[in-house]
Amino acid sequence: MTIETPTKPYFESLQILRGIAALSVVILHVLHEVNVTAIKMAVTVPSWVETQLPFWVGVHIFFVLSGFLMVYTSQKLFETSSGWKTFLKKRFQRIVPLYWFYTTAMVVVILILPSALDTASLDWAHVIQSYLFIPHERPSGGMKPILALGWTLNYEMFFYVIFAALLFLSRTKLIILISALFIGLAASYTFISSDWAMVKFLSNPIILEFVAGMLIANLYINNLRLPSWGLLIGIILCLSIFLCMPFKIMGVPYVPSFLIAIISVAVLVLAKNN
């Protein structure tokens, strides 16, 4: 089987999607900070802050992209005895130094200006687990590391470790095993006691987005392509979901973000001439 090399337009569309995802995350955090500040100052929260639009979509897009890229960029590592070393080395170099730098900066700020932060505190167990990407409940509450924005990296590292451990398998077998594991974890999420904080955190159905990304990569590698008009239909569908779909469907949150993330990555990757 011949493995295609991505063309320049494909990389351009991927970068555009990343940019949109990053922008949505920025908007999400701006809305959150404005809301928190307004409450602290005992003033009326601006009406535009109370938008119901799913700006969480950026986080979900990054998760689907991660699943896609891990499979697509690791094709030479499957069925090798040392592939896991190469894989983890690349992940470490790409993520860990920068994350540790900002985590250290947070620790320094807490030491020097402890009153400047509302939720972070200098509990050394909290600090160590944050550096090691171990999901845990922080002293002030919530399953977040000392650098709160790093909560997504706890999921990423969980995915990377399992992915690396199974690289001795073929691509198909690896995808099947990880998919089965993650589907099983997600299905058990509501039944896991909150006392098992780490297990419950790692069982969040958001991990299914890694599965979606891996499946999209497998379709791409196997040369499945959508019709040329698929990209336009996908964009229209994503916009419609973003603007019109309720935040919750049958009590399940983040459904719009989940659907938009999968559809957007799929059409940008699989549409012909991309």
Image (cartoon, rainbow, N blue to C red):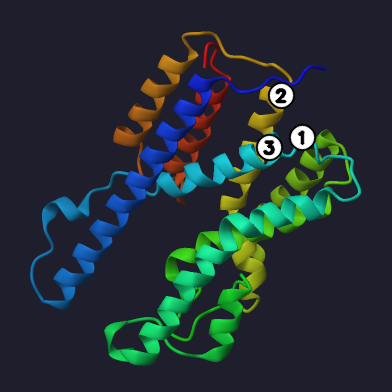
The amino acid on which the numbered mark 3 sits, given as a three-letter code, is Thr
| Residue located 43% across and 42% down the image | 257
Sequence-wise, which precedes: disc 2 or disc 3?
3
In the picture, the disc for residue 27 is none
Mark 1 or 2: in front is 1
The amino acid on which the numbered mark 2 sits, given as a three-letter code, is Ile
Gap in angstroms between the C-alphas marked 2 and 3: 11 Å
Name above or below for residue 137 compared with residue 44.
below
Residues under numbered marks 3 and 1 in contact, where contact means CB atoms less than 8 Å apart: yes
Q: Residue furthest left?
A: 43
What residue does disc 3 label?
73
Residues under numbered marks 2 and 3 in contact, where contact means CB atoms less than 8 Å apart: no
What residue does disc 2 label?
221
Name above or below for residue 160 compared with residue 37.
above
Sequence-wise, which precedes: disc 1 or disc 2?
1
| Residue located 63% across and 45% down the image | 210
Q: Is residue 225 left or right of residue 162?
A: left
What residue does disc 1 label?
75
Q: Tell me which corner region of the image, top left, top right, bottom left or bottom right, holds residue 162.
A: bottom right
Residues under numbered marks 1 and 2 in contact, where contact means CB atoms less than 8 Å apart: yes
Q: Is residue 188 visible?
A: no
Gap in angstroms between the C-alphas marked 1 and 2: 9 Å
